[in-house]
Amino acid sequence: MTQTTNTVTIKMAVKVNACEISSSVEAGRGVLTVVGEVDLSVSERLDSAIDAALEACATDAELVLDLGGVEFLDSAGLRSLLRGAKAASAVDVRYAVVPSPAVTRVLEMACVAPEILGVRDAGSATTAR
Amino acid sequence: MGPSDLRFRHEALLYEDADEFVADTSRFVREGLDAGEAVLVAVIEERARPLREELGADASRVEFLAMAEVGRNPARIIPAWQDWVARNTGRGTGLRGIGEPIWAGRTDLEIRECRMHEHLLNTAFDDGPAWTLLCPYDAARLPQPVLEGVTHSHPAVLGAAAPARSAPFDGNAGLAAFAAPPPELGPPLFETPFGLADLPMLRTAVRERADLLSLRGRRQVEDFVLVADELACNSVRHGGGRGRLALWASDGHAVCEVRDRGLINDPLAGRRRPDLQTKGGGAGLWTANQLCDLLLIYSTPAAGTAVRAHFPVC
């Protein structure tokens, strides 16, 4: 019993910092939802998720990265977002990022123009359907 | 036009009082305006005000930059000059600026970084387009070692005579920018080794100490967490995969230091705008410089690297 309690505690501690990535594609249009903290230790996973979502998207469709739930992003995470933008343009998929305040802050600090990532107002990931 | 007009000219001006400052800088500005040059003056407001008054209507043809803001972290001054030079090289005229990074009242640590900045100006601009930068120094109020160092970082010194013990000019002194160890701060309030997998825990550890570090409000906490994360990321990516992080609360600043076995070769590291579209690094130190008042970098082949960030909490 004690052991079970310990396990739960550890899971909760990890959950505070975890990064959850989920994606859905409908009619060739993809939405990739990222929740939690995006740093160097998850940037490879994010790269793969973006690549997989792009593959599932139809040409001329769009991929929306819903980052409204991202509580932390660093320059390694930002690098993944920029890499995704490049990859999307190579396969003719429109790329759009819905940022959280943490994402916007890092863009500002790294002098990345929001247009490069197709930054949209929060909320448009769901309302644009 | 002699050969010296075709390259970057970095001159110091030692002035004895405010009147001399105004007389000499206004003459320098007017020479530029008369020649149709672009002129930027980056000084503290206490100096800008009398200069503007002396220039009268001409002041509107001069761009002013508040040095207390742009130079609060001396590492942000070179990018500001680079932006201005880039904006104005197309106009086909000469360019001249006045930059006073060191004023009476700067802390010893700020002065240390400012002196390095003066050397790094040569590193940053010697191979670039021609322009002239005049750096005024308050000879009456600045510490003697600062005045003695002026000739070391500036090929030409105007105004009052430089102190007798002055060092000769060395245009390459900026290459030794990271040779000085950071000052002793005493026992840290937190210290831990880390690797890639520890980055999330590292951020949690920093957040948990927000009160001890006098960080106020979510924005301030998360900005400092970002600084700590970026420095730690650099150790993971460039410093041998792991490092050691330490935190202090010190004199109006939350201080974060990361040490690793890596070596920083580029004396302008942290002063170059990052290019995240390519593989190049530099975003971490750049970001830390944007958020901090000081970023002390110590890096030698024997000692490895220590980067210490002073984040303002006032």
Image (cartoon, rainbow, N blue to C red):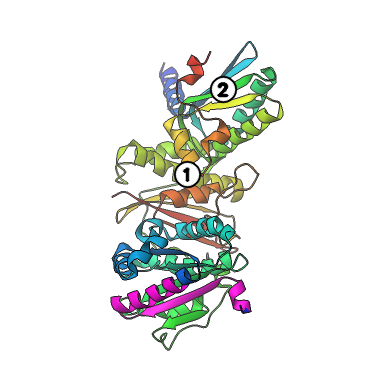
The answer to whether one can see residue B183 in this image is: no
Left or right: A44 as drawn, with respect to A16:
right
How dense is the environment of label 1, judged by Cα within 10 Å: few (below 14), some, or many (20 and up)?
Answer: some
Question: Horizontal and vertical percent for residue B157?
Answer: 46, 81
Mark drawn on residue B215: none
Q: Are marks 1 and 2 on the same chain?
A: yes
How dense is the environment of label 2, judged by Cα within 10 Å: few (below 14), some, or many (20 and up)?
Answer: many
- Secondary structure of residue under mark 2: strand
Magenta span: B3-31
Q: Quadrant of residue B301?
A: bottom right
Quadrant for the N terminus of chain B, please.
Answer: bottom right
Question: In the rendered structure, which amino acid carries the disc numbered 2?
Answer: Val
Residue B11 sits inside the magenta stretch: yes
Mark drawn on residue A109: 1
Residue nearer the viewer, B43 or B37? B37
The answer to whether one can see residue B4 in this image is: yes
- Residues at discs 1 and 2 in contact (Cβ within 8 Å): no
For the image, the number of numbered tags is: 2
Q: Given the image, what chain letter belongs to the residue carrying mark 2?
A: A
Question: Horizontal and vertical percent for residue B223?
Answer: 40, 42
Left or right: B46 as drawn, with respect to A22:
left
Residue nearer the viewer, B120 or B196? B120
Q: Given the image, what chain letter belongs to the residue carrying mark 1?
A: A
Q: Residue at x 63, y 48 (%)?
A: B280
Q: Main secondary structure of the magenta part?
A: helix
Residue B298 sits inside the magenta stretch: no
The residue where tag 2 is placed is: A64
Q: Is residue A89 above or below residue A4?
A: below
